[in-house]
Image: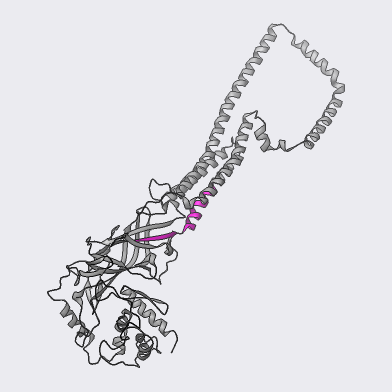
Amino acid sequence: RPASIPFLLALICASYCTADSGVDNRNHHGIKIVSHPSSNAGEGVKEVSRSEAGTMCSMCSRSGTTLLPNNRPLPGLPGLTCEYLQEYDVGLKPSDSPECIGLLDLFENRCCDLSAFPESYECETTIRSSLFHDSYDPTVRPVQTMNTPHGTMRGVDVWTVITFVTLRSLDIKSSTLEIYVAIDLTWNDPRLRWDFNQTNCAPTVTVRANPSIEETEIWVPSLDLRSRASSAQDLPNSLATVRSDGTVSWMRLGPLNAICSFVGLPRMPFDDLGCRLYFGDNDMNTVVNYKLVDLGNNLTKGFQYYPILNQSYTEYNQIREKTRTDYNLEYSENEFHLDLYFGRANRHYITFSIFPSIIFTMMSFGQFAVDVQSGERLSFSITIVLITVAQSIITADILPVCNEMIWLNFFNLVSMIFTLLGILETLLALWFFTVAGRKQEKEKEVEKDDEELHNLVSNDTGSDPNLEEEDVNSGEGQNDEFTPVTQRETRITNNEDDDMTKQKKTWKDLKIVRTFTQRPKTPEEVVDRIDFLCLIFLPIAYTLFIVIMFAANERWGEDPSWA
């Protein structure tokens, strides 16, 4: 027989028992097995060792029939027979253990000779007719006396397991979260017990269960989501399973829409978005205790992830290691909360929002290398600003409208400010050239007026222009014979001076040094100096801003308190 058969049996039993949401959590062949509540409500299931148990589990002891050793209960495992199952799995468990009860419910109809018993549907019909008579009232809670560590009290213990299946939507603008979950509730109703015998020969029966009194056959807990946009009572209806000891198992699967006070959002898009879901009894019953089943992790009691379904190509993914469950009050089990965290696919935001903002802001600094009097510089600056504004509008569409400063919002805002500084410098430079140009025109007009006034004064004093011209020509004629030699000597001297200047050029002659040591003399030099300073310091300042923002994103903003 294959060695994997015990493992597969444990897996089947684990799946079956987990669906019924019991109390204890045991390990069988490496598989977590969750058992059922005891028929003695409030006492729970007591761990029974083999030495404490009087007898071991027998496949057909409950029905009082004989074992069919060669039957194969699972067609997918042809090597598994009822004899092997009894010897190596069922027979190893105490007869009063919940694992024994679960295995009997699974394999009794397949491994025991029930030919003398009525058909299963006849058994269930008989049981239902005896259970649901005029005395059963679904509005009455099955409150029983319980022995607890705090004393004897009355109440109803509802063992609770919430299974997270998938995330359907997460809307940060409306602060809502929609998830697909399975809510599994198990409790004990002593009014639904029966003795398993040849007449009541069904170990379980199915009944209608519904939050609506008019549509249900049994009492059901009114567990609901307190922070809800849609009620858990609106989940699709499903049948409940009732065992012979009065244990009721009811599981519903469907969407749950919650209103969230998100934490982590200020660090968007590097956030781990958290949402706390509050659960409690819809009727505010203090006698109904929702026991979170221990599934192997004390931090996530009563919660598990659906193991098969893993979403891909989604914006958000579950961060399972941050999931937490706990009761709202230490001394009360009437209410509990579930903390879910989701990691954002930040690569999308980096690629289509952050990176373009950095590129366009850096490109805007290139305007300082263009002549300020050129029309292309102003056009380039305005184009960059328009692109940045359009990028901010696209980003704002995915951000919530709130007073809190979000990391992505602040990053885009400062990037736009750096871009606006560039265009502001260009406008100031154009204004400076306009003012300087007007001043130069006025100075030229004054010089022209002075020249005209000088000519008038010369004419009034009676000087002979022709005589002055002869004197000038006479002087020029005297120097004609020396002109070629003088010009040649001058050129030689200038070349020697240039060579000496090149040889004597030091670090003080660098443009960046002259920018800080020499005083500009013309408007062009002033604007060139400002452009040069902006071209150096603005990119450096923006680079430092980027480094600081990425280094501080984990400590950015304050989260609202869930307390």
- In the image, taking residue 463 as reference, residue 413 lies left or right, namely left
- In the image, taking residue 307 as reference, residue 135 lies left or right, namely left
The residue positioned 68% from the left and 6% from the top of the image is 460
Residue 128 in the image, given as x and y percentages of width and height: 18, 79
Q: Nearer the viewer, residue 291 or 365?
A: 291
Q: Is residue 518 above or below residue 413?
A: above
| Image label count | 0
- Display colour scheme: one colour
Q: Is residue 200 above or below residue 173?
A: below
Q: Nearer the viewer, residue 103 or 502?
A: 103
- In the image, taking residue 412 as reference, residue 493 lies left or right, namely right
Q: Is residue 308 magenta?
A: no
Residue 509 in the image, given as x and y percentages of width and height: 72, 36
Q: Is residue 456 above or below residue 318?
A: above
- In the image, taking residue 232 as reference, residue 408 lies left or right, namely right
Residue 92 in the image, given as x and y percentages of width and height: 36, 85
The residue positioned 59% from the left and 27% from the top of the image is 437
Position of the N terminus, as image quadrant, is bottom left
Give the prevailing secondary structure in the magenta stretch.
helix
Q: Nearer the viewer, residue 30 or 417?
A: 30
The residue positioned 39% from the left and 64% from the top of the image is 299
The quadrant where residue 23 appears: bottom left
Position of the C terminus, as image quadrant, is bottom left
The span picked out in magenta is 337-360
* Residue extending farthest left: 134
Q: Is residue 422 above or below residue 194?
A: above
The quadrant where residue 85 appears: bottom left
Q: Is residue 341 magenta?
A: yes
Residue 284 in the image, given as x and y percentages of width and height: 23, 60
